[in-house]
Image (tube, rainbow, N blue to C red):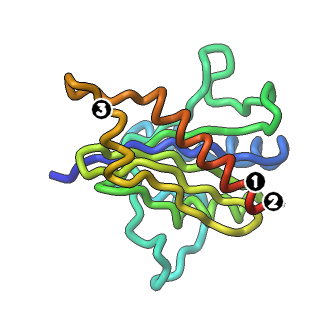
């Protein structure tokens, strides 16, 4: 039985592109993922041709669903500076970004793929911007800093540091 890696991908971009992805994803979600949703390649389901030699082959998502608040369930969040559409899913052992890159390319979007599987010491985010994919990952020592004496993980503090690392990376890329 694999350890499950929790993932949340926030697609970022122009509202029409996000709405197109949202429409296509919700159709796939209603037709396939909500009924079965086990071991599906999201790229294939969205009509993306994935070459045999691609790293995206074998990247299957489990327990996949759109995110949104009750009033805007599975909608595009236009209330933020950069509009976004978010999907949560699990993968086996580690994050699987290559299919997500193909989806972003198809819809002309960027993304942040947040992931954690603390049992294997995996915590971080992939940032896809301007056609480049970058992994911002915590070291084992950084992860250990966020456990208290009772063995509980402080997600809020870890997320704050991760966001700071992402912003530092983006500042370096954009300067």
Q: Name the residue located 81 percent from the left edge and 59 percent from the top edge.
A: 174
Q: Is residue 69 visible?
A: yes
Nearer the observer, 174 or 16: 174
Position of residue 131 in the picture relative to residue 124 (left or right)? right
Q: Earlier in the sequence, mark 2 or mark 3?
A: 3
Would you say 57 lies left or right of 107 here?
left
Q: Can residue 26 be seen in this snapshot?
A: no
SS at badge 2: helix
Q: Could you tell which of marks 3 and 1 lies nearer the N-terminus?
A: 3
Q: Which residue is mark 1?
A: 171
Q: CA distance from mark 2 to mark 3?
A: 33 Å
| Residue sitting at x 46%, y 55% | 137
Which label sits on residue 147?
3
Q: Are marks 1 and 2 in contact (CB under 8 Å)?
A: yes
- Label 3 crowd (10 A; few <14 / some 14-19 / many >=20): some
Circle 3 sits in a helix, a strand or a loop, which is it? loop
Label 3 – label 1 distance at C-alpha:
29 Å
Looking at the image, the residue that sits furthest to the top is 71
Q: Which residue: 51% across, 42% down?
A: 8
For residue 153, which quarter of the picture? top left
Depicted 79 relative to depicted 50: above or below: above
Disc 2 crowd, CA 10 A, few/some/many (<14, 14-19, 20+): few
The dot on residue 134 is none
Looking at the rendered structure, the secondary structure element under dot 1 is helix
x and y percentages locating residue 119 in the rendered image? 23, 45
- Provide residue 164's location: percent of width, then percent of height: 62, 42
């Amino acid at each position: 039985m694999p350890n499950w890696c929790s993932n949340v991908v926030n697609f970022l971009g122009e509202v029409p592109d996000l709405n197109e992805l949202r429409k296509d994803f919700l159709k796939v979600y209603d037709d396939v993922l909500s009924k079965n949703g086990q071991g599906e390649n999201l790229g294939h389901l969205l009509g993306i041709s994935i070459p045999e030699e691609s790293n995206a082959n074998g990247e299957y998502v489990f327990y996949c669903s759109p995110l949104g608040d009750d009033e805007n369930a599975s909608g595009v969040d236009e209330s933020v500076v950069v509009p976004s559409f978010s999907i949560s899913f699990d993968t086996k052992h580690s994050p699987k970004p290559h299919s997500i890159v193909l989806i972003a390319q198809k819809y002309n979007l960027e993304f942040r793929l947040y992931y954690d599987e603390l049992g294997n010491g995996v915590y971080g985010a992939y940032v896809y911007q301007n056609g480049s994919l970058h992994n911002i990952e915590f070291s084992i020592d950084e992860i250990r800093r966020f456990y208290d004496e009772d063995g509980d993980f402080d997600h809020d503090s870890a997320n704050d540091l991760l966001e700071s690392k992402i912003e530092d990376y983006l500042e370096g890329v954009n300067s």
